[in-house]
Image: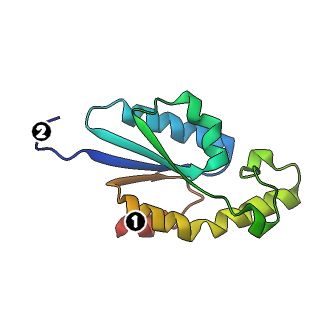
């Protein structure tokens, strides 16, 4: 990368289900392997623990937000649909995901990435990307 070139900053937002996290983390790895690309993954603390050991922290940064467990009636640590043992718990995980929209929007504005790779279950990211 030329010294005068700006580093491309790509933000990844995987949905809170293991089957959604794995492909986005793999895509993040591909982008991070390119010179001149800074990669950030925005997720929750527990979801980050699912993949943290599988990435090179020198190439990918992880930004976490607190999942609103208490607000939706979940015990700490249940932040993922794969952890939901019933439809009631899955509904609470969904509710927590909904409550995270505003904090995620605020964090995206703070990070101010050049590009956002978002899961289809975060459709509101299209609007924030246009900002």
108 sits left or right of 45 in the view: left
- Residue 18, above or below 35: below
User: Residue at the location (44% across, 65% down)?
Assistant: 126
Q: Horizontal and vertical percent for residue 2?
A: 12, 36
Q: Earlier in the sequence, mark 1 or mark 2?
A: 2
Element at badge 2? loop
Q: Are marks 1 and 2 in contact (CB under 8 Å)?
A: no
Q: CA distance from mark 1 to mark 2?
A: 26 Å
Which disc number belongs to residue 109? 1
Kindly indicate the quadrant of the structure image that contains residue 50.
top right
Q: Horizontal and vertical percent for residue 54?
A: 56, 28
Kindly indicate the quadrant of the structure image that contains residue 58.
top left
Residues packed near mark 1 inside 10 Å, few (<14), some (14 to 19) or many (20 plus): few
Element at badge 1? helix
3 sits left or right of 16 in the view: left
- Residue 103, above or below 53: below
- Residue 68, above or below 34: below
Q: Which residue is mark 2?
A: 3
Q: Horizontal and vertical percent for residue 53?
A: 58, 29
- Residue 2, above or below 95: above
User: Residue at the location (38% across, 58% down)?
Assistant: 111
Q: Horizontal and vertical percent for residue 43?
A: 57, 51
């Amino acid at each position: 990368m030329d010294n005068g070139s700006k580093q491309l900053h790509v933000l990844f937002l995987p949905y809170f289900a293991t089957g959604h996290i794995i492909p986005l983390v793999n895509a993040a790895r591909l982008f991070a392997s390119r010179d001149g690309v800074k990669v950030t993954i925005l997720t929750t603390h527990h979801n980050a623990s699912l993949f943290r050991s599988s990435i090179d922290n020198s190439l990918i940064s992880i930004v976490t937000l607190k999942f609103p467990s208490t607000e939706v009636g979940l015990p700490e640590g249940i932040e993922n649909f794969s952890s939901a043992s019933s439809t009631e718990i899955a509904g609470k995980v969904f509710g927590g995901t909904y409550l995270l929209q505003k904090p995620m929007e605020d964090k995206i504005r703070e990070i101010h990435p050049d590009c956002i790779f978002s899961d289809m279950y975060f459709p509101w990211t299209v609007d924030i990307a246009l900002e």
